[in-house]
Image: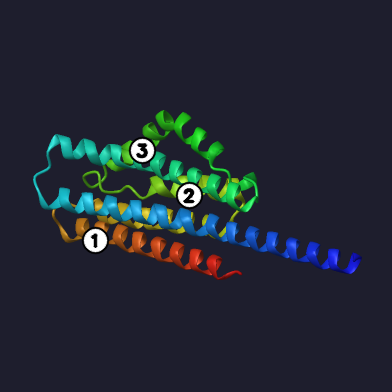
Amino acid sequence: MNGTTGVAETAAELHHLRQRVRADRQTIGLPLSVFGALTLANAALVAAHAATSQTAVAKLALLLYWPCAGAIGLLVLGWHAGRVAQRAGVGGGRRSYRPVTIGYVASLPVLAVLFVPVFFVGGYWATLEWPAAILTAISVRQRNNTLYGAAVGTALAGLAQGLFAATPHGSSGAWAAIGVEVALGVALTLAGLMASRRGRAVR
């Protein structure tokens, strides 16, 4: 009887461990996928803006994109993390996005002062430092080296984007800045999908 109970307890512990592994993989994959998709959406907006006349409304939309998109991305991640915690019973812990979301919303005025001037470089096109800051906050909160590496890569891509963007409107350098953002968005999205797939492969 004790042997049967021990086997059952071991199986339950193994199942719980697998759930934790899947949840940990999701904390890597989903942020990359979400912010990769948001980066691609921003690149599409910037490309449309570059190909048409630069109206005041379009410029305002570009300035407001990342502050709003960042908040939406964090809310999506928080909602998903809550579902995982309820379904798998693994708890929130470091996976919780609530502290990051609250800190993000509370610090929006400061972030605006720091980052909005950067957006004016090259006609509002140098924007990747914003998602880099958000991914950095998530990686520090979750103590996740993979996400931190993605944040550093995003920041470096933002520097390259800024160099390309600091060229006259409509030049090849300006379009190269958009290309950098597209490449980063695709890379983040694919990396997120691969991480999520590896997480689902854990049985």
Disc 1 target residue = 176
Name the amino acid, label 2: Leu
Secondary structure beneath disc 1? helix
Sequence order check: which comes first, mark 3 or mark 1? 3
Residue mark closest to the camera, 3 vs 1: 3
**Spatial CA span between label 3 and label 2:** 14 Å
- Residue at the spot x=54%, y=38% of the render? 98
Q: Position of residue 127 (x, y in %)?
A: 32, 47
| Label 2 crowd bin: few (<14), some (14–19), many (20+), radius 10 Å | many
- The one of 196 and 55 positioned closer to us in this rendering: 196
Q: Nearer the viewer, mark 1 or mark 2?
A: 2
Q: Is residue 159 visible?
A: no
In this figure, which residue is indicated by the disc labeled 3? 67
The first of marks 3 and 2 along the sequence is 3
Q: Position of residue 22 (x, y in %)?
A: 59, 61
Q: Quadrant of the N terminus?
A: bottom right
Colouring used for the render: rainbow
In the shown orientation, is residue 177 left or right of residue 159?
A: left
Q: Where is residue 174? Give x, y as percent.
A: 21, 55
Do labels 3 and 2 touch, CB within 8 Å? no
Q: How dense is the environment of label 1, judged by Cα within 10 Å: few (below 14), some, or many (20 and up)?
A: some
Q: Is residue 91 visible?
A: yes
* Element class at badge 3: helix
Q: Residue furthest front?
A: 1
Q: Name the residue carrying label 2.
A: 135
Taking the spot 61% from the left edge, 53% from the top edge, the residue there is 88
Q: Is residue 87 left or right of residue 169?
A: right
Separation (CA) of disc 1 from disc 2: 23 Å
